[in-house]
Image (cartoon, rainbow, N blue to C red):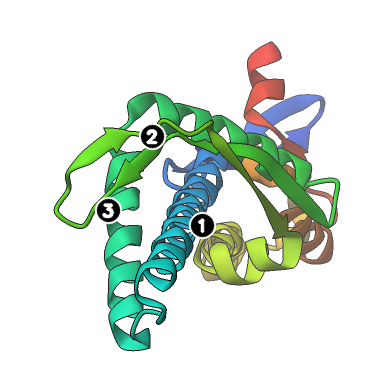
Amino acid sequence: HLDIIPMNFDDGVMEVQFVQSDSSLGGDAFTRRLASYLVEELAAKEAEYNQHRHDHRALEISGTGADSAAAAVALAASKAAFRSLIQSDANRLRRIHRMAEDAKIGLSTSSSVTVRDLPTNFTATTNTTTSATTQPTRFFDITIERDFFEEVLCPDLFAAFEGAVESVTSFFIDYEEDTESLDDLIVVGGAAQMPRIEEFLRTTHPDARLISAATLGAH
């Protein structure tokens, strides 16, 4: 949830001009985007692993590798099957969401984070038949760069966030108010702590105060 609150102070009295809210631009929107990416990567890695095992068995049996076109089709079908399995597993999705939240927080202070030990302990076939694997659980690591997070995964979310802040400025311009007369601009939400958002606000609204939802709740 995002709240943008322009404020003025007059003789010690705090006046809230208005509150602009957007429930779709809170920190959780970025977490969900990261979680979706982790699901896709996990499904792809598991599909590739199983395809490699299948190709290896085929080579042992026939002495020839799989046809490349057929292998690509099988790989895509396998990835879709694994994606469906992951999305139908509530416990796995909760764990992935927690990992995505940790990764999002990590990207606020680091240029990259590695999500470690994403587990797989199932097999899948293209006809949706599934069975538990007897092999030990495999773990995958996925590294996410901040630039990739900002420019590839979430450019629309960042643009919408920046647009929401700019719309506040536009409001005052439309009504012939001097934006410099605003004493404070408070931006509330987990996304406000992200480096790109902080940089944007420092450039466009250097006096803005950024408050996370957790900090607000503590008060």
For the residues labelled 3 and 2, the Cα–Cα distance comes to 15 Å
Is label 3 in contact with label 1 (beta carbons under 8 Å)?
Answer: no
Along the line of sight, which residue is nearer the eye, 31 or 186? 31
* Quadrant in the picture for residue 68: bottom left
Q: Determine whether 11 is above or below 83 in the image.
A: above
Please tell me the numbered disc located at residue 164: none
In the structure shown, which secondary structural element does the residue marked by tag 2 occupy?
loop
- What is the x, y in percent for residue 195? 79, 54
Tell me the mark number nearer the camera, choosing from 3 and 2: 2
Measured Cα–Cα span from mark 3 to mark 1: 12 Å
Residue situated in front as seen by the camera: 97 or 211: 97
Numbered tag placed on residue 45 in the rendering: 1
Residue contact between numbered discs 3 and 2, judged by CB atoms under 8 Å: no
Q: Please name the residue shown 60% across and 57% down the image.
A: 165
Q: The residue under label 3 is which amino acid type?
A: Ala
Location of residue 53 in the rendering, given as x and y in whole percent from the top left corner:
45, 59
Please tell me whether mark 3 sits on a helix, a strand or a loop: helix
- Classify 10 Å Cα crowding around label 1: few (below 14), some (14-19), many (20 and above): some
The residue to which callout 2 is attached is: 133
Q: Determine which of the numbered discs, if any, sits on residue 81 in the image.
A: 3
Q: What is the spatial separation of the Cα atoms under label 1 and label 2, in whole angstroms?
A: 16 Å
- What amino acid does circle 2 point to? Thr
Q: Which residue is found at the position 32% from the left and 87% from the top?
A: 69
Relative to the observer, which residue lies in front, 186 or 112? Answer: 112
User: From the viewer's perspective, is 22 left or right of 71?
Assistant: right
Q: Position of residue 87 (x, y in %)?
A: 32, 41
